[in-house]
Each structure stands twice: as C-alpha cells, then as structure tokens.
C-alpha cells in the first residue's frame, strides 16, 4: 500500500515539474485563475452587501464554502490533475500501454497531468479560508481533515464520471459537463436547495458531501456529522473503485468504445 | 527447450451494436440495437520456445494485434487457453508484466510531456528495480541506441524514430526475457528500421531473449525472425521456419546476371525472364524443373558474364502467394 | 497530453467568392449546420442551462421569499426571468476563441495569409451561424422550463425586444471572444484571457443580477460597457419592457459591434504582421 503511495507521489511530482517547466505559461495560468476567482468572490461580496443573508447563510459562511471548494479543486488539479481528461485518455486507447505495466492503471491515469491553473485555485482558496472565513487557528487540523474528506469524495465522483468512457463514446464531454455541474452546485449555499435538488446534491453530484457537510462540521462540529462524512467517504471510494474496475474489465474484454486504433 | 508461450485453440470475438445514422438511427440503435459479431481470433494454437524469434504476420484485421494483446494480458479471450511463462496472461497480468517487455508501434507507454530520463526513472519505480543494476542497463542501452543527447527532451517532441528507440529502451529496462513488439517499425525510415532490426537481433542473440513481433513489413521477418506464423481471418494458415517457408511456397530462385551483352538468353525449361534494364538479365528459376547450377553453367558458357547474384525471392512475394493460396 | 476540446469545423470544399456577402452567409449556414450536427454537445449545453437555471432560480426565489431587513428590494416577480435571459445569451455563444487559438497555434492560418480579411470575417460569420442554432435550442429549453415552472410570463411585446436584443447581444459576445482568441498570436493559451472576459461579462454584464443593483458608480460604468450591452440591456426588458429603452439599447449595441469589429480587425492585422515577421 505504501509502495502505491510512494510510486504515486513520484509520478505526480514528475507531472508537477512538467507544468512548472514553462514559467511564463505557468504564471499566466495561475495568475489568470486567481484573477478569475477574484471576480467570482467580488460578485459574492456585492451580493452579501446588498442582501445580507440567504437561508441562514451569511458572508463568512459562504466564504468557508468557497474557500473549501477552491482549495479542494486546486489540490485535485495539481496532484490528481489527470481526472479532468480521463475520459479522453481512455477513449484514445492509451490504457493498452498502461496495462502492460505491473502497477495501478488508475494511479497512472490520475497522476499523468498537473494543471497549472489549479495552483491559482489552491492559493485563492487558502486566502479565503484564512482571511474571510472567520475560522480560528485551533480549527486548522479539522479544516485539513475536511479538505481531505471533500477532496476524496470529489475525486471519487469525477473518477466515476470519467469511467463512463469505458461504456459510452460520448463520455468525454459528458464527463466534463458532469464535473462542471458538480463544481457549480458546490459553489452555492446549501440552503437554497430543496426537494429533488437536495436528493441530487447528496447522490449524483455530491456537493452535499464535498462541501456542504464539511462546512457544517466546521461551524458546528459534532460526532454525528463526522460519522456521516466517514460513511460518505467509504461509500464513494468503494463505488468509484468498483465502477473503475468494472469498466477496466469491460475494456479488457474488448467491449469498450475506443477511437483511433 | 521448454515452451515459453503455449496457445491452445484461442478465440476472441467482438460483438458490437451497429450504429444508426442520424438522430433517428441513433435512437433506434439505443432502443433495439442490431448486433454484429466479428471473430478476430478464430481458434489458433502454437508454442514458442525460449530464444525463438517469431514473426506473426497477416493482412489488416487478421488478428495479429489481438493475439499479442491477449498474450500480454491486456485483452481477455472469448475461449481457449494460453500460458506465458506458465502464467495465464489475463488473470495474472501484473505478475507477468515484470517478465515481459512490450512495445506498441502506435501507442506510447512513456510519459509524453516528461523528459525521457524522467520517464525511465519512473519506470524503475514501477518495475521495482534496484538503482545500480538499472542505471547500468540504462546507460548501456542509451549508448547502444545513441539517444544520450535526447534524454532531456519530452518524448512527444521527438521524431518517430527517436521515440521508438526510447520505447524499446523502456521495454528492456527491467530485463524481461520475452519481448512483444507490435508493429515496431511502422512509419520509420529505412535507417531507423535497420537500426531497430539490428538491435532486436542482437538482443535475442546475446541475451537469449524470446521475441515475438507483428509486422506488415516483410523485411522485418526476413532479417529478424527465424520462424513465421501467418494469420489470416483469425486462423493460422502457415507456421514454419522462415527458410522453409520461402522454399516451400515458391521453390524459386532469382538469378540476376550482369553482362557485356545487352541480354542473355538461356534455353532451359523452368526459366522465366523478368523485365530488367539493359545488360541485366533477371531469371526466375523454378527449382523443381531445373537446377540453379544448370542455369549458371548455361549462362557462363556464353561468356561475358560480369556478375551473378542468386537470391531467394523477396518475402513480399512469398506472403502474397500465401494469402492468395489461402483465400480459396 | 492536454488539448482543448474544440469541435472541428469542416471547411467548404470550394470556397465561395471572396469578400462577398454570399460568402459570409454561406459560412454562417455552415456554422449553423455544423452546430446542429453535433447534437450531443448541444444537448450538453441545454443540460447546462437547465442545471444553472435551477440553481439560480432557487437562489433568487429564496432571496425574494426571505425579505431580510435592510436588504435590497427585488422587483415584483423576482429576478428569475431576467437571469433566464442573460444565461440564454451566455450559453448560446460558441467558443470561437478556442477555434482561433487552434488555427493560430497549429499554423493552419498559412493557407489564409493571402486573403487576410476573409478568414476572420468567415470565422466570425461561421460562429454567428452556430450562435443562431444554439440560441434556438436553448430558447426552446428555456420556454419549456418557464411553462413547467408556472411563473408569470412576460408580455408579448417584451418577447420581441428580448429576442432582438438577445441575438444582437450574442453577436457582441462572439466579437469579445474573437478578440480573446486573437490573443493567441502573442500568448500560448488564451484560457486566462477568456476567463477574465467571461468574468467581466458576469460582473459588468450583470449575468446574475441587474447592474442597477450595484453601487451607483459601478452601475454607470457597467451600463456603458459592451458587457452590459450584451447581457443586461436584453435582460432588463424582462423586468421593465419599454420601447424607448429598446431603441436606446439597440443603438448602444450597434455602436459596440462597430467598435469591437474595428478592434478585432486591428488585432488581426497586428497578429499577421507578427507572423510574417517571426512565424508563429
């Protein structure tokens, strides 16, 4: 298991070095994304200046939410960036070459890319969390844990979306759309969701577990909330690994759509 | 010599739904799909012993790549059995991976955006190789293939020939005893092809590696392999040593004469003249009807012969003959 | 191996007569046909619209229902239809910046260097064709959502104003993205510039809320900007339909189209000069 992690770290580090290699491009990507997030935050700032609260959520609550989301998105993009284009990689048949090697295919798929722009998300997220979220320094370990939990479930969901490529040819845009939907619903205060949309954010697009419940955990820590999160992590990770394995087995039966060769 | 690879009645069929055209067709296809089954591999059996260099050839879609994918553990067969080093490839893929090296002509197993040396370093970890022996192997391969100047370049920025050299190095770094090469020389220029062929032959000779390669290029077979398996429509049609194949299928020799005279005429049965430039005469000799020495003797009698070449017909022709004769 | 997922456009087998309106109309038709042919992507766009609208409707309905003391007052009927209009325009615009970036980086431009003006005009015309196709599909999705939601539908006159200003607004967004794509002459990835332009559209264009809600100075800057010309002025017709506002808005839009076209042409010429001097 530790071999798996060490190998993964080496591969991810190599991908990060590549994204850093072109300094100008890196700076542009990171800077551009930081500016982009800045605008986004400015809009929320204007919203709360005008409307003060929404459904019990104030400005600092939304700051926790957005800070978490951006940090999670940032870490995912930097250290596991292959998730974004996983469907395309699978559809192009590159998995063949990976299967001839004795290590995990999923690890290879996730570590193959590190997005320079994700550093912008990571940095903005940290700034928001430390400066605007109204958190105390004593909450730092809990915050780190919540980032880890959210990251795990986010990656599990996107791995499932990407694995659709083992079944469906149009998975490339579908997987990206689903991932973008997930980020979208994770960027709004949970109190606005009711009825069917509440079901969706706790299942297919698990914003409820990626950010909403972690925010609740940070504002009002409780054992029950923690247990819910632990269960969610277990379920989503198990689901993601199963779906991927099923898809890979299908690929190895030759039943997957593969473009190119 | 024990068998490294054994294949018994291997079969692989693909079943896929026919795609409808346009929106209506796509909807119909989603609700009530029509299926088509293709047998890519239709019952093949063979054994390969350690140290053999085998070429698997055949027309496009014959099942060569599918066979290789099954043997390297990437693909599961529909039926039949296969063992490589006693392991079942698709069930014991990871264990097998340590003992085989695979090169795909059309796909890369390296990290495209990383400098080549980073790819090699990562492969060391993936194959759990110790640093010192690995470094020695890498250095000797790098020297042998003359890629020392390229190590800092990302693989995807290299030319095809350079990339293939790196791919082959990558496949050998963990000292596998069996090499699978799927179209290794495709798209390469003559010099690059020659370099790779030489290398494969050398490896097999020095390290006793078993080599299985698929190719469209018949020179690959001629120069590298000592045994040929011809697959057509998923079945083995020929499985013989390379020389025997040539002799059996054609029983012909090509005799090329260079002379002072514009043309040499030889009146013997079993000889067909092929078109050629002046002062060159190319004779196709059917060795079942007349012996080559008779032809040479007849040519020398006239005098004025400046050069004689006796060759086997090119593999191209052999293969074409085989496909033609098995198409009935 | 990162690559932008730009849909590939098919060039006509025999190019129509240069620089004529015919050529541009043909390009527009081709753009529309190409967009309709890629119907899975269109469905995705439609899906995006539905998801985004569901979230934003939930947001603004909640704000309207809550009446937090000292908060800004929403117009009667809320902001949902306004956002429906602005999102419709935003989501209908094809990613011309990606296509331009691809062409510039891959060197496919070389073929067109002999006829500089035509390439850009053709590309924009093609994109406007695609815009028309997407606009129709997403409008259908919007109408369906509106009917299902049971909200009060704006008056018929308002529809005319909305559709006209919305289509012209879409052209403004296309021009903004075109200038973005042309930046590829100088920077490798236009994504950062694109994101900034997009955020300007969100913020100064009033995507999520009318710019009249902003502090006065900001509202004035926004109203004059091309971003508001693209989104706010069409959207505001859903809140206060008005003929005089319509004509003023249309005039402002046409001015911006002129200015942005001129800017695009200038940037294009500068880019070509750069290529001719030092290659891509």
Image (cartoon, coloured by chain):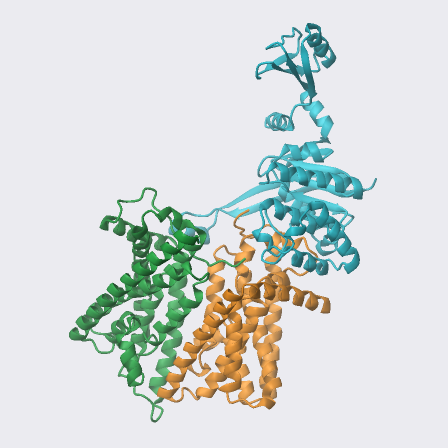
Chain colours: A orange, B cyan, C green
* Quadrant of the snapshot with the N terminus of chain A: bottom right
Point out residue C155 in the picture as x, y percentages from the top left corner: 20, 73
User: Total of numbered circles in the picture?
Assistant: 0
Q: Nearer the viewer, residue B83 or C3?
A: C3
Point out residue A21 in the picture as x, y percentages from the top left corner: 57, 64
List the single residue furthest toward the bottom.
C69
Q: Is residue B212 above or below residue C204?
A: above
Whether residue C210 is visible here, answered yes or no, is yes
List the single residue furthest toward the left.
C244
Q: Quadrant of residue C258?
A: bottom left
Point out residue A92 in the picture as x, y percentages from the top left corner: 54, 53
* In this rendering, position of residue B311 left or right of residue C106: right
* In this rendering, position of residue C136 left or right of residue B277: left
Q: Is residue C131 above or below residue A126?
A: above
Q: Is residue C78 above or below residue B107?
A: below
Point out residue A238 in the picture as x, y percentages from the top left corner: 62, 69
List the single residue furthest toward the right.
B1
Whether residue A208 is visible here, answered yes or no, is no
Q: Nearer the viewer, residue A21 or C58?
A: A21
* In this rendering, position of residue B259 left or right of residue C71: right
Q: Image point 61% across, 81% down: which residue?
A: A145
């Amino acid at each position: 298991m530790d071999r798996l992690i060490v190998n993964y770290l080496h591969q991810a580090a190599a991908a990060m070095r590549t994204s850093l290699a072109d300094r100008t491009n890196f700076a542009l990507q990171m800077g551009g994304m930081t500016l982009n997030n800045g605008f986004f935050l400015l809009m929320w700032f204007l919203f709360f200046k005008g409307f003060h609260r929404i459904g019990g959520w104030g400005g600092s609550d939304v700051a926790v939410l957005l800070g978490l989301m951006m940090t999670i998105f940032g870490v995912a993009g930097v250290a596991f960036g292959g998730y974004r284009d996983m469907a395309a990689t699978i559809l192009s048949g590159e998995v063949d070459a990976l299967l001839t090697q004795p290590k995990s295919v999923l690890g290879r798929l996730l570590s193959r890319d590190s997005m320079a722009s994700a550093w912008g998300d990571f940095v903005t997220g940290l700034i928001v969390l430390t400066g605007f979220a109204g958190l105390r320094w004593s909450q730092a370990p809990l915050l780190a844990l919540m980032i880890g939990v959210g990251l795990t479930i986010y990656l599990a969901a996107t791995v499932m979306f990407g694995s659709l490529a083992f079944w469906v040819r149009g998975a490339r845009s579908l997987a990206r759309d689903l991932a973008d939907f997930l980020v979208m619903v994770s960027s709004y205060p949970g109190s606005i969701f009711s009825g069917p949309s509440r079901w969706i954010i706790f299942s297919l697009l698990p914003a409820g577990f990626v950010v909403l419940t972690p925010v609740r955990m940070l504002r009002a820590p409780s054992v029950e909330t923690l247990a819910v999160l632990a269960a969610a992590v277990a379920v989503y990770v198990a689901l993601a690994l199963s779906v991927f394995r099923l898809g890979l087995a299908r690929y190895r039966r030759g039943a997957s759509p593969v473009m190119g060769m | 010599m024990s068998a490294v690879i054994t294949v018994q009645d291997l079969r692989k069929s693909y079943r896929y739904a026919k795609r409808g055209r346009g929106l209506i067709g796509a909807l119909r296809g989603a609700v009530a799909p029509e299926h088509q089954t293709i047998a890519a591999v239709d019952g093949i059996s063979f054994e390969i012993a350690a140290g053999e260099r085998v070429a698997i050839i055949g027309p496009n879609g014959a099942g060569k790549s599918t066979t290789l994918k099954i043997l390297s553990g990437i693909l599961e067969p529909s039926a039949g059995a296969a063992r490589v080093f006693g392991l079942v490839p698709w069930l014991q893929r990871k264990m097998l991976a340590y003992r085989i090296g695979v090169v795909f002509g059309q796909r890369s197993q390296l990290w495209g955006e990383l400098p080549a040396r980073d790819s090699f370093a990562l492969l060391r970890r993936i194959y759990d190789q110790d640093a010192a022996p690995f470094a020695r192997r890498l250095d000797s391969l790098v020297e042998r293939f003359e890629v020392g100047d390229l190590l800092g370049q990302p693989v995807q920025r290299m030319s095809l020939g350079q990339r293939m050299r790196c791919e082959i190095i990558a496949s050998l770094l963990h000292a596998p005893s069996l090499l699978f090469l799927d179209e290794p020389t495709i798209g390469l220029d003559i010099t690059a092809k020659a370099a790779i062929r030489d290398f494969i032959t050398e490896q097999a000779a020095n390290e006793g590696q078993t080599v299985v390669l698929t190719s469209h290029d018949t020179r690959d077979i001629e120069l590298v392999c000592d045994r040929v398996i011809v697959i057509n429509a998923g079945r083995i049609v020929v499985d013989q040593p390379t020389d025997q194949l040539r002799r059996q299928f054609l029983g012909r020799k090509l005799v090329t004469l260079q002379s002072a005279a514009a043309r040499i005429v030889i009146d013997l049965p079993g000889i067909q003249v092929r078109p050629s430039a002046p002062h060159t005469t190319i004779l196709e000799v059917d060795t079942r009807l007349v012996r080559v020495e008779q032809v040479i003797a007849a040519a020398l009698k006239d005098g004025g012969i400046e050069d004689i070449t006796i060759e086997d017909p090119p593999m191209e022709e052999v293969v074409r003959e085989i496909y033609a004769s098995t198409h009935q | 191996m990162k690559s932008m997922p730009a849909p590939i456009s098919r060039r006509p087998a025999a190019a129509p007569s240069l620089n004529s309106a015919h050529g541009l109309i043909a390009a527009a038709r081709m753009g529309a046909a190409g967009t309709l042919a890629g119907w899975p992507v269109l469905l995705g766009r439609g899906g995006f619209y539905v998801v985004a609208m569901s979230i934003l409707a939930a947001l603004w309905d909640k704000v309207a229902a809550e009446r937090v003391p000292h908060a800004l007052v929403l117009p009667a009927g809320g902001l949902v239809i306004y956002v429906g209009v602005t999102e419709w325009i935003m989501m209908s615009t094809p990613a011309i910046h990606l296509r331009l970036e691809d062409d510039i980086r891959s060197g496919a431009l070389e073929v067109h260097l002999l006829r500089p003006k035509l390439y850009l005009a053709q590309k924009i015309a093609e994109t406007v064709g695609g815009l028309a196709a997407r606009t129709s599909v997403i409008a259908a999705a919007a109408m369906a959502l509106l009917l299902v939601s049971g909200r009060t539908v704006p008056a018929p006159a308002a529809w005319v104003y909305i559709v006209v200003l919305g289509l012209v607004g879409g052209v403004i967004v296309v021009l903004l993205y075109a200038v973005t794509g042309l930046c590829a002459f100088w920077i490798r990835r236009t994504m950062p510039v694109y994101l900034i332009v997009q955020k300007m559209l969100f913020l100064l264009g009033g995507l999520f809320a009318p710019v009249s809600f902003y502090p006065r100075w900001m509202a004035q800057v926004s109203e004059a900007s091309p971003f508001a010309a693209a989104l706010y002025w069409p959207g505001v017709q859903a809140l206060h339909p008005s003929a005089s506002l319509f004509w003023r808005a249309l005039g402002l839009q046409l001015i911006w189209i002129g200015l942005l076209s001129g800017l695009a042409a200038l940037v294009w010429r500068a880019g070509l000069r750069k290529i001719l001097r030092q290659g891509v």
